[in-house]
Image (cartoon, grey):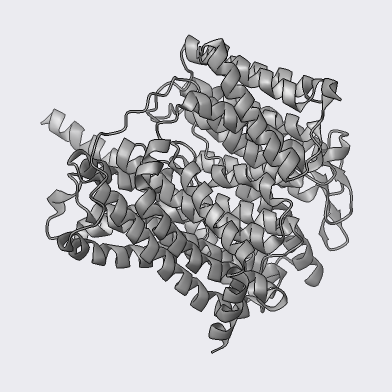
């Protein structure tokens, strides 16, 4: 009953003409930018950030959430028509989506992806609505030790699942945490690593880092070669899936939604892992697994549902615990803090209109996205024809002007430029950039939580291990960090035994 | 890739040493809790160990990471250089010359010299792009963009 009243409050906020306008604009902009190859949700949100500065917090977050799921859907259009995943969460969609397009079924693949995203998005919002309040109530009992351990757990999961190399993910996290140390320290008010610059007293602005790493860095990587886009020639007129398609897709959509939502809730996992797992699940339980990779609609519906459901899931830890689980939610958290709102359990008590307004707007946003996407699929596909040579100067222009508008300071623009070059280098050398942003935002919070914990316990570190929740989180951190070691040891012993067998064969 | 990892490893090593040295000038602990230097010291030390591991992995242990060489060809590198150079010059001249002119010149430069557009199409695209962004930020959001010589 309480949830029902709260969601009614949310709808009263989300259905105001202004907020409806921002939800629509967010969906449209998110899809349009998300369609462009190489520009994922994080980059899209980074580009839209400067526009939100002058808005009220609710409208800004409604627009940002809409951009997030719009961009998530936009990525699937590129995956299906170009075989280029707009972002990592669409990698699995490429496999069967592109094959469907080659068989002349691009329209159905895109429509099923839109419908799957809609169903998954709606289910994940229901999940968010049901799961967030009780979790927030539990989180109200959390003190600094629990938060410290939980943030450590979040960072460890990111390391574990971050990219191809755990060592490089770890380096990215430490770099982000170090960036978070710049400025006046939260304990004694001493300046650290400011290089004598007044602008750095408040710390490194996360927007500058995001725009540099994901805006400028992405442009430099993509501009290396003249990108030639070959859109597959296919009919986009047949958009209504047949009964057979519905039957084949219903199960994968439901399963994908559940996988996406629950994995999204875990810090550090999110859209990419859930789409991989959904694809693997569908292939495993399919009666005809040989169809996968040759244009199976289940291979599109499942992962697409999963990566969209993950959006709702990732907002659960953000709203209830104040801990972002991904780079994108870290940026959203940064924006909330910029507006003076502290994400966490108290948000439900102090600003119910804000939280429930966003949740309700996500219901509405999903409907807008479906209504907009089905008829506009041919239009979005045509955006892909805009040459990248025109697009990237525009991205540079937006990043430049956006960062300047933060504080009308060229220092920030120069820092964005430096982070752009760093972003280019780390992308070329395969270091994951998203953990840097996540750690930059979490860094000062981790430090403050440890400081408060040790003040409570008079300097006794045992407080982190004697409180049940905190101890449980630390055990999980320990297990997570042991997994790579175990994997390395297992691989090594396997290699040694193979070597022994080979020698025996050679001897005999 | 191995050579690039080695270079990055050395750079990170230098950075970590600087972080650790700087952290020693800060207070390590206050009464019961960590001081301003506590986190930077341990983070710097962690980075030092990780960068040594990266170097070790890519020199002595010879990483099996099979990745194409991340250094692009001469032409691609030239394109990247031109973009970085034009951005740098724009940053230097932005406030002096003003938003409209410097951004117009930046886009025209990129379109003509990097993307080989004809001057008239480059001019038209730049004018449209700059006015579009100007109308969003200056007119729509009231951001005080520097007028420069158009003052």
Instruction: Please indicate whether residue A2 sits to the left or right of residue A239 in the image.
Output: right
x then y, percent, for residue A257:
36, 65
Q: Which residue corresponds to the image point at 64% horizontal and 65% vertical from the top-left? A: A322
Q: Nearer the viewer, residue A204 or A445?
A: A204
Rendering quarter of residue A187: bottom right
x then y, percent, for residue A444:
74, 54
Q: Quadrant of the C terminus of chain A?
A: top left
Q: Which residue corresponds to the image point at 24% horizontal and 61% vertical from the top-left? A: A249
In the picture as drawn, the residue positioned furthest to the bottom comes out as: A1
Instruction: Please indicate whether residue A333 sits to the left or right of residue A379 in the image.
Output: right
Instruction: Please indicate whether residue B63 sits to the left or right of residue A21 in the image.
Output: left
Q: Nearer the viewer, residue A508 or A236?
A: A236
Q: Which residue corresponds to the image point at 49% horizontal and 15% vertical from the top-left? A: B76
Number of numbered discs present?
A: 0
Rendering quarter of residue A104: top left
x then y, percent, for residue A291:
14, 50
In the picture as drawn, the residue positioned furthest to the left comes out as: A508
């Amino acid at each position: 009953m309480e949830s029902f009243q709260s969601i009614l409050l949310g709808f009263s906020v989300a259905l105001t003409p202004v907020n409806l306008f921002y939800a629509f604009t967010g969906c449209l902009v998110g899809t349009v930018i998300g369609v462009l190859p190489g520009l994922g949700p994080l980059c899209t949100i980074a580009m839209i950030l400067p526009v939100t500065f002058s808005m009220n917090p609710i409208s800004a977050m409604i627009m940002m959430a809409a951009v997030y799921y719009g961009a998530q859907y936009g990525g699937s259009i590129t995956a299906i028509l170009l075989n280029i995943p707009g972002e990592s969460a669409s990698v699995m969609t490429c496999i069967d989506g592109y094959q469907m397009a080659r068989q002349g079924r691009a329209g159905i693949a895109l429509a099923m992806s839109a419908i799957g995203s809609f169903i998954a998005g709606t289910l994940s919002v229901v999940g968010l609505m049901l799961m967030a309040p009780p979790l927030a109530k539990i989180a109200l009992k959390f003190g600094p030790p629990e938060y410290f351990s939980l943030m450590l757990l979040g960072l460890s999961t990111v390391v574990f699942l971050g990219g191809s190399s755990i060592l490089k993910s770890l380096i990215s996290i430490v770099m982000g945490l170090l960036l978070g140390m710049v400025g006046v320290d939260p304990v004694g008010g001493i300046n650290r690593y400011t290089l004598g610059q007044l602008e750095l007293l408040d710390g490194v602005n996360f927007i500058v880092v995001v725009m540099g790493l994901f805006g400028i860095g992405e442009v430099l990587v993509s501009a290396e070669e003249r990108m030639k886009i070959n859109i597959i020639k296919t009919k986009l007129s047949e958009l209504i899936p047949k009964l057979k398609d519905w039957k084949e897709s219903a199960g994968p959509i439901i399963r994908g939604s559940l996988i996406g939502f629950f994995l999204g809730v875990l810090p550090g996992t999110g859209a990419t892992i859930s789409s991989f797992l959904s694809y693997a699940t569908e292939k495993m339980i399919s009666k005809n697994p040989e169809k996968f990779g040759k244009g199976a609609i289940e291979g599109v519906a499942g992962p697409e549902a999963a990566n969209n459901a993950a959006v709702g899931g990732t907002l659960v830890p953000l709203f209830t615990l104040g801990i972002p689980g991904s780079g994108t939610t870290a940026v959203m958290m940064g924006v909330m803090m910029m507006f003076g709102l502290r994400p966490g359990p108290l948000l439900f008590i102090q600003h119910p209109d804000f939280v429930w307004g966003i949740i309700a707007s996500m219901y509405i946003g999903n409907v807008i996205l479906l209504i907009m996407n089905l008829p506009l699929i041919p239009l979005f596909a045509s955006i892909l024809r805009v040459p990248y040579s025109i697009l990237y100067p525009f991205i540079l222009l937006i990043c430049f002007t956006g960062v300047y508008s933060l504080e009308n300071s060229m220092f920030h623009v120069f820092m964005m430029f430096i982070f752009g070059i760093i972003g280019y280098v780390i992308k070329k050398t395969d270091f994951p950039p998203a953990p840097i942003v996540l750690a930059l935002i979490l860094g000062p919070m981790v430090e403050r939580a440890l400081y408060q914990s040790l003040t409570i316990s008079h300097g006794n570190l045992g407080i982190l291990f004697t409180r049940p929740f905190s101890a449980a989180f630390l055990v999980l951190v320990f297990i997570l960090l042991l997994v790579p070691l175990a994997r390395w040891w297992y691989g090594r012993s396997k290699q040694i035994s193979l070597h022994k067998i080979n020698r025996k064969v050679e001897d005999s | 890739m191995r050579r690039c990892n080695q270079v990055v490893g050395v750079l990170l090593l230098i950075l970590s040493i600087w972080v650790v040295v700087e952290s020693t000038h800060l207070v390590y602990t206050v009464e019961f809790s960590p001081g301003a230097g506590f986190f930077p010291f341990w983070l710097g030390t962690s980075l030092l160990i990780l960068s040594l591991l990266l170097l070790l992995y890519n020199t002595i242990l010879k990483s099996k990471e099979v990745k194409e060489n991340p250094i692009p060809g001469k032409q691609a590198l030239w394109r990247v250089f031109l973009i970085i150079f034009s951005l740098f010059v724009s940053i230097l001249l932005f406030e002096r010359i003003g938003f409209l002119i410097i951004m117009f010149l930046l886009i025209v430069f990129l379109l003509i010299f990097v993307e080989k557009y004809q001057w008239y199409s480059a001019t038209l695209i730049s004018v449209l792009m700059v006015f579009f962004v100007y109308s969003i930020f200056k007119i729509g959001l009231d951001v005080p963009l520097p007028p420069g010589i158009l003052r």
